[in-house]
């Protein structure tokens, strides 16, 4: 490494630190302060560290709403991911292996689905009609519907790299379509499946807009909605608001640490091919 | 007897049913409902009344305009900054792996959390940004309280939050450019700046396509960040289509809200379709 690269690196790191790291440090500091001290978000260290007290108080707010929210968000995320992986892989598989007018038309619809904004009020009207409005399973189905485009796209291009000889060998051995898919194909999709799970889980866990529309009601609160609900309550308690931000950032942070490579793979898919 | 395909169409049924019922049906229904006076109790046919209202009421028309401004501004900044950061972070300098992670992390953090955080940081008197500016003698503006500034402040935060994704996509794109091109350019005596414009920019085009289109769609549809930071305020100065749709829904004007949804759909289609055709044609030309 040349001196120049070291100098540029040091300058860049200083700039990056100010722009991208200090905001998160402020969250941590403010979440450790007393309400009076936190009233102005500034760069001082807390005079008295009350991190643990703030944590307990935030969790207990509104009758442990945060814990309920964590539970609800987990149910929605896990349910939607299971559906997306199995159903999405089945669609990507058939769309890639069969080239007909029907599959081409459907693939076009998948792409259109990535672009079209969901029609929210008609969706609410429809969910009310089939008794899925304000229900967790309704929310799971919505997240599957909205996540299919990305999932099918990734599976379809990955399946193109799996040789057809494998399917044909399994067909000759007398496997049924379901057996071939679940025993031969699905296990081979593991790398792209991990990518899809990680990227979609973060997206669904962080989703604010759709639960706001389709899942109102205190008993249905999701993690992102807690912030929104607490905002009015914590108006003079910025320390607790920031503690809440901190607490709901932990899952994405863990995923980021352990699955960095898969996230990068998923988020940059398409960058090379266009 | 016809041999049955090992790739049966019924594999498409579970996903297809969910997609059809929960996505396509409401989308198609939205075209009808946008032509009605619709509230929680009834829907009466109204012709194009809702659309007329959308473009004649200043507070609604403002949302359409702001949506375009916001999307173009954030998409442009993310594209330019993303490419520059990607070049910087592949130059082999000290700590570039660490910096890649740092610039990307905000992409994964809750948007509402980011919005509320910056709402505090941008407080006119007590926010950290203006406190820091006062140290160097600058009297910081009311980032979110000044009506002519609020939309741009939110746009800046959106760039802060999303530039990491653009950078990441560009880094992946840069990795596909063969070093031979740069070597040939150097032998021909090209300067670094010439290499950037004549080699990097044309050859990284697939990544540019992805970044521009993704960030435009995201910018046109953005709701959560604006809602967390300003709720469209002060007044209606930072309202965009997505926040108008939510406000009209809450106020019980379902028909008007749905018309906003259809307008958003049309805006996205009008912006994105020609653009992606243009990008694809250019790629063939190269």
Image: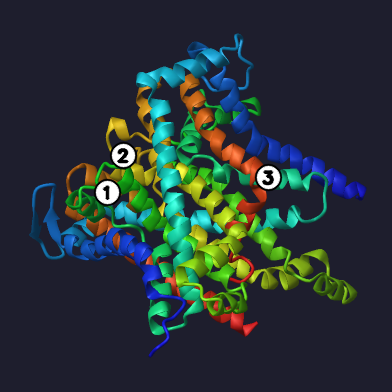
Quarter of the rendering containing residue B51: bottom left
**The C terminus of chain B is located in which quarter?**
bottom right
Q: Is residue A205 left or right of residue B19?
A: right
Residue A193: x and y in percent read 56, 57
Q: Is residue B141 visible?
A: no
Judge the density around disc 3: few (<14), some (14-19), many (≥20) Cα neighbours within 10 Å: some
Task: State which tag comes first along the sequence, 1 or 2.
Answer: 1
- Subunit of mark 2? B
Residue at the spot of label 2: B235
- B242 over B202 or under it: above or below: above
- Mark 2 burial class by Cα count in 10 Å: few <14, some 14-19, many 20+: few
Say whether residue A36 is visible: yes
Q: Which mark is residue B168?
A: none
Q: Horizontally, is A141 left or right of A70 in the view?
A: left
Q: Residue at x 41, y 82 (%)?
A: B4
Q: Earlier in the sequence, mark 1 or mark 3?
A: 1
Q: CA distance from mark 2 to mark 3?
A: 38 Å
Residue A271 spot, x, y in % from top left: 61, 65
Please state if A229 lies on the left or on the right of B120 as rendered.
left
Which residue is under mark 3?
B101
**Contact (CB < 8 A) between labels 2 and 3?**
no
User: Disc 1, disc 2: CB below 8 Å?
Assistant: yes
Task: Please check whether the numbered discs 2 and 3 fall on a single chain.
Answer: yes
Relative to the observer, which residue lies in front, B203 or A257?
A257
* Residue corresponding to mark 1: B59
* Nearer-the-camera pick, A199 or A274: A199
């Amino acid at each position: 490494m040349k001196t120049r690269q070291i100098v540029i690196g040091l300058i860049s790191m200083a700039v990056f630190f100010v722009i991208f790291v200090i905001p998160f440090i402020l969250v941590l500091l403010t979440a450790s302060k007393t309400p009076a001290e936190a009233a102005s978000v500034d760069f001082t260290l807390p005079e008295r560290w009350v991190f643990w007290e703030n944590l307990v108080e935030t969790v207990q707010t509104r009758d442990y709403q945060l814990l309920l929210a964590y539970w609800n968000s987990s149910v929605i995320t896990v349910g939607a991911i299971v559906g997306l992986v199995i159903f999405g892989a089945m669609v990507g598989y058939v769309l890639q292996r069969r080239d007909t007018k029907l599959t081409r038309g459907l693939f076009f619809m998948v792409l259109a689905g990535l672009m079209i904004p969901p029609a929210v009020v008609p969706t609410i009207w429809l969910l009310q009609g089939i008794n899925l409005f304000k229900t967790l399973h309704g929310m799971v189905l919505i997240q599957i519907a909205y996540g299919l485009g990305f999932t099918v796209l990734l599976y379809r291009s990955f399946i193109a790299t799996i040789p057809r000889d494998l399917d044909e060998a399994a067909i000759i051995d007398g496997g049924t379509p379901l057996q071939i898919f679940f025993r031969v194909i699905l296990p081979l999709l593991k790398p792209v499946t991990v990518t899809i799970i990680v990227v979609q889980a973060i997206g669904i866990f962080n989703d604010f807009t759709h639960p706001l529309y389709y899942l109102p009601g205190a008993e249905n609160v999701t993690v992102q909605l807690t912030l929104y609900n607490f905002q009015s309550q914590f108006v003079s308690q910025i320390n607790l608001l920031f503690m809440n931000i901190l607490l709901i950032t932990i899952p994405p942070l863990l995923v980021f640490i352990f699955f960095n490579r898969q996230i990068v793979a998923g988020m940059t898919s398409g960058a090379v091919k266009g | 007897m016809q041999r049955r395909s090992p790739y049966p169409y019924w594999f498409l049924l579970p996903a297809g049913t969910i997609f059809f019922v929960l996505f396509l049906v409401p989308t198609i229904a939205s075209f009808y409902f946008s032509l009605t006076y619709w509230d929680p109790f009834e829907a009466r046919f109204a012709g194009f009344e809702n659309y007329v209202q959308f473009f004649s009421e200043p507070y609604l028309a403002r949302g359409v305009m702001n949506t375009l401004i916001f999307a173009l501004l954030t998409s442009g900044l993310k594209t330019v900054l993303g490419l520059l950061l990607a070049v910087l972070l592949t130059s082999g300098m000290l700590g570039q792996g660490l910096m890649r992670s740092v610039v990307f992390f905000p992409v994964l953090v809750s948007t509402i959390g980011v919005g509320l955080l910056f709402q505090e940081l941008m407080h006119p008197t007590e926010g950290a940004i203006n406190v820091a500016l006062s140290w160097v003698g600058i009297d910081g503006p009311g980032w979110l309280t000044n009506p002519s500034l609020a939309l741009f402040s939110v746009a800046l935060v959106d760039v802060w939050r999303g530039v990491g994704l653009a950078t990441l996509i560009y880094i992946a794109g840069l990795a596909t450019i063969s070093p031979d091109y740069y070597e040939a350019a150097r032998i021909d005596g090209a300067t670094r700046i010439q290499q950037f414009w004549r080699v990097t920019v044309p050859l990284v085009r697939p990544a540019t396509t992805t970044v521009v289109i993704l960030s435009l769609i995201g910018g046109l549809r953005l709701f959560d960040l604006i809602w967390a930071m300003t709720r469209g305020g002060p007044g209606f100065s930072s309202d965009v289509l997505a926040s108008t749709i939510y406000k009209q829904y809450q106020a019980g004007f379902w028909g008007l809200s749905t018309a906003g949804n259809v307008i958003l759909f049309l805006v996205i289609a009008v912006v994105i379709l020609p653009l992606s055709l243009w990008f694809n044609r250019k790629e063939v030309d190269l």
